[in-house]
């Protein structure tokens, strides 16, 4: 009786995953592995070897890697500060970090476009102050900046969460056994926060790798990431077969990155750094 | 046993205007097994954390081996702590946990390996090197926490209710283990518990605390047989605490009846507290007792019967190997030296001595 009720409750989710995850996925595979006449082929997937496509993949991997690393370096100290704040304003501080996430992603990036433009707000102010202007828009740096800005909270929050869960007595135990603050950090805090770092990396790296909005708006369509190439195949060229084929390649890279991080996680549990 | 290894001088500590320790003075001798005993919230852990260096007192000094260490950070102190909930490093195996302190001190690998073997043998967990803490039972984790502390050869081991989470049988076993360890290692133990039986079993010296005040310091026998005030008497073991009048030396009036006792020097017709342990009450025929009453409750406790006797308006708690059924009329007799007379608490500590149920 109760079992049936639970099953009934899960029904919407079943329909959801079939309709919006499984069927689209199957369609991607269908289009990606066939040509226009419907014959089975690997040519769409192998198209990644084309210099234009390959270059866009490498740039995407590079930019998302760099922004993930910078996000991590920025987030860890930030998460530590947030986790150690004792005052009542703690909730407010975290809210300030999460708040931008509630705004539309496109809107936020558009805002940065107007801010960073050569004749944009920032440069106008700089000019007014007789300072050198920023020539950052439409460069890879602008894209990295956009990625960091948009994905930083996804790195901060999981790290903050694991740091909060670390028992203070463990840190006291390390100090008790003769470890100073730096040793305590590297031998206890850092290894225990690896799970948070891992999920942070995944949550930043994957969307950064696949983005096309950020590179479109801040890269001025001059720097094509693999996400842009795929988007254009679907929208401009209406070549769903090629778009799907390249998507499959991208998926493979995402799966590889997730497996790598998962392996790192296992290692991190066994031994201290 | 003579050196004062640790000396706490006028230690006070409060949290958000709530006074937790008030002008505490306490010294601990080398090689002593000292137990801080008191109800939950009386400041035992705070005292231990001040000694361990995890908390700084608001006033007062911590002297260790003649040196003032009040401001010395925890990692520089020559003592180790066994934490209340073990606090093992879950990301390291047992060997790595035990080696933690030694690696920090850059000891050689062979020295560390020997120490791990030795410590695991000492706590009866040989061969557990490669296990993870999560795969061990509570008792085993506790013993690893002890092993991890003692390999560092501290002068003092601080233990905060280390057996609190274990079941009764295991707790009793571990009590003997700890006494054995202490004798084998020859180091000073400062032990915190709220369990009076544990304190009586293990300690050389017991420090009874309540609400941030030390109530009494003494050997287990002194604490049990000669409690200094009603709080101690009530907290250590069962007892009958009765508001009485000291008529003159060696005579006390309890609930209207005159009892001979051995105490002197309280003055004449002075209000006092009398403590009589339940096992010191002798039940006799009604006409043979100093006072008499009727049995109202009886419980079989294994070694003895626990009875309550209503006499002169007071429920007397009595332990006896002889059984008297409920409703039986009995007399109560007490040997003079088993009547413990205590002054009523002085005004300053009045609050601290409130006996709680
Ligand atoms: N970090 C703290 N912040 C505020 N109050 C505390 C803190 N630590 C302990 N206390 C308070 O101090 C009192 C004594 O605590 P503690 O020393 O832990 O007692 P015990 O170990 O004897 O149970 C308690 O009332 C407790 O609530
Ligand atoms: Mg405590």
Image (spheres, rainbow, N blue to C red):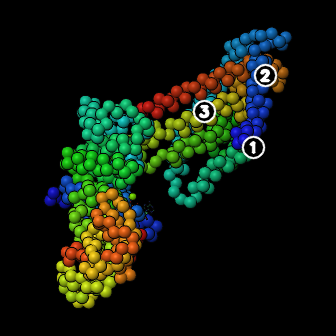
- Queried on whether the Cβ of the residue with tag 2 lies below 8 angstroms from ligand 1, the answer reads no
Few, some or many residues within 10 Å of mark 2 (<14, 14–19, 20+): few
The numbered disc on residue A235 is none
> The C terminus of chain A lies in which quarter of the figure?
top left
Considering only order in the chain, which callout, 3 or 1, is on the residue closer to the N terminus? 1
The numbered disc on residue A202 is 3
Image point (55%, 45%), residue name: A160
Whole-number angstrom distance, CA of label 2 to CA of label 3: 25 Å
Residue B315 image offset from top left, x and y in percent: 37, 75
Image point (30%, 34%), residue name: B126
Q: Check disc 2 and report its element: helix, strand or loop.
A: helix
Q: Is residue A36 above or below residue B30?
A: above
Considering only order in the chain, which callout, 3 or 2, is on the residue closer to the N terminus? 2
Judge if badges 1 and 3 mark residues of a common chain: yes
Farthest bottom residue in view: B269
The numbered disc on residue A27 is 2
Q: How many marks?
A: 3
Residue annotated with mark 1:
A104
Residue B125 image offset from top left, x and y in percent: 31, 36
């Amino acid at each position: 009786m109760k079992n049936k009720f639970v099953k009934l409750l899960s029904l919407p989710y079943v329909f959801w995953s079939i309709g919006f995850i499984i069927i689209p996925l199957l369609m991607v595979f269908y289009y990606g592995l066939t040509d226009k006449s419907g014959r089975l082929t690997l040519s769409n997937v192998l198209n990644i070897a084309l210099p234009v496509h390959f270059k866009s993949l490498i740039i995407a991997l590079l930019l998302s890697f760099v922004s993930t690393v910078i996000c991590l370096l920025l987030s860890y100290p930030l998460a530590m500060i947030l986790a150690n704040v004792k005052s009542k304003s703690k909730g407010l501080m975290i809210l300030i970090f999460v708040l931008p996430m509630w705004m539309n992603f496109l809107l936020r990036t558009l805002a940065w476009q107007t801010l960073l433009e050569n004749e944009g707000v920032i440069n106008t102010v700089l000019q007014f102050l007789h300072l050198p202007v920023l020539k950052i828009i439409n460069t890879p740096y602008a894209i990295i900046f956009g990625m960091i800005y948009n994905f930083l909270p996804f790195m901060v929050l999981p790290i903050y969460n694991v740091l909060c869960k670390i028992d203070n007595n463990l840190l006291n135990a390390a100090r008790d056994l003769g470890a100073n603050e730096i040793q305590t950090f590297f031998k206890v805090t850092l290894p225990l926060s690896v799970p948070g770092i891992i999920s942070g990396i995944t949550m930043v790296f994957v969307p950064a790798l696949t983005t096309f909005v950020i590179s479109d708006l801040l890269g001025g369509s001059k720097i094509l990431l693999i996400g842009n190439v795929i988007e254009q195949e679907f929208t401009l060229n209406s070549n769903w077969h090629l778009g799907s084929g390249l998507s499959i390649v991208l998926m493979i890279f995402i799966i590889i990155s997730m497996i790598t991080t998962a392996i790192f996680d296992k290692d991190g549990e066994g031994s201290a750094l | 046993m003579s050196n004062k290894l640790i000396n706490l001088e006028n230690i006070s500590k409060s949290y958000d205007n709530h006074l937790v320790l008030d002008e505490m003075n306490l010294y601990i001798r080398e090689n002593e097994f000292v137990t801080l005993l008191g109800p939950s919230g009386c400041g035992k852990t705070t005292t231990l954390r001040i000694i361990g260096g995890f908390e700084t007192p608001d006033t007062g000094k911590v002297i260790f081996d003649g040196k003032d260490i009040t401001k010395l950070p925890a990692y520089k102190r020559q003592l180790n702590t066994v934490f209340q909930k073990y606090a093992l490093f879950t990301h390291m195996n047992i060997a790595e946990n035990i080696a933690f302190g030694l690696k920090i001190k850059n000891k050689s690998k062979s020295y560390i390996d020997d120490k791990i073997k030795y410590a695991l043998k000492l706590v009866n967990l040989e061969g557990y090197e490669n296990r993870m803490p999560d795969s061990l039972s509570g008792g085993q984790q506790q013993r690893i926490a002890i092993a991890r502390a003692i390999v560092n050869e501290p002068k003092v081991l601080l233990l905060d209710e280390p057996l609190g989470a274990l079941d009764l049988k295991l707790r009793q076993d571990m009590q003997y283990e700890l006494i054995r360890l202490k004798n084998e290692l020859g180091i000073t133990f400062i032990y915190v518990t709220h369990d009076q039986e544990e304190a009586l079993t293990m300690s050389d010296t017991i420090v009874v605390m309540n609400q941030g005040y030390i109530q009494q310091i003494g050997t287990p026998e002194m604490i049990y047989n000669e409690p200094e005030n009603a709080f101690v008497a009530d907290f250590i073991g069962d007892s009958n605490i009765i508001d009485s009048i000291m008529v003159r030396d060696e005579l006390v009036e309890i609930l209207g009846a005159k009892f001979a006792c051995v105490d002197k020097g309280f003055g004449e017709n002075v209000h006092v507290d009398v403590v009589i342990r339940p096992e010191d009450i002798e039940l006799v025929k009604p006409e043979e007792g100093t006072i008499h009453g009727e049995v109202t409750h009886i419980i079989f406790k294994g070694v003895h019967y626990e009875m309550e006797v209503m006499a002169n308006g007071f429920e007397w708690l009595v332990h006896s190997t002889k059984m008297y059924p409920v409703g039986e009329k009995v007399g109560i007799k007490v040997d003079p030296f088993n009547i413990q007379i205590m002054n009523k608490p002085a005004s300053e500590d009045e609050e601290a001595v409130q006996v709680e149920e």
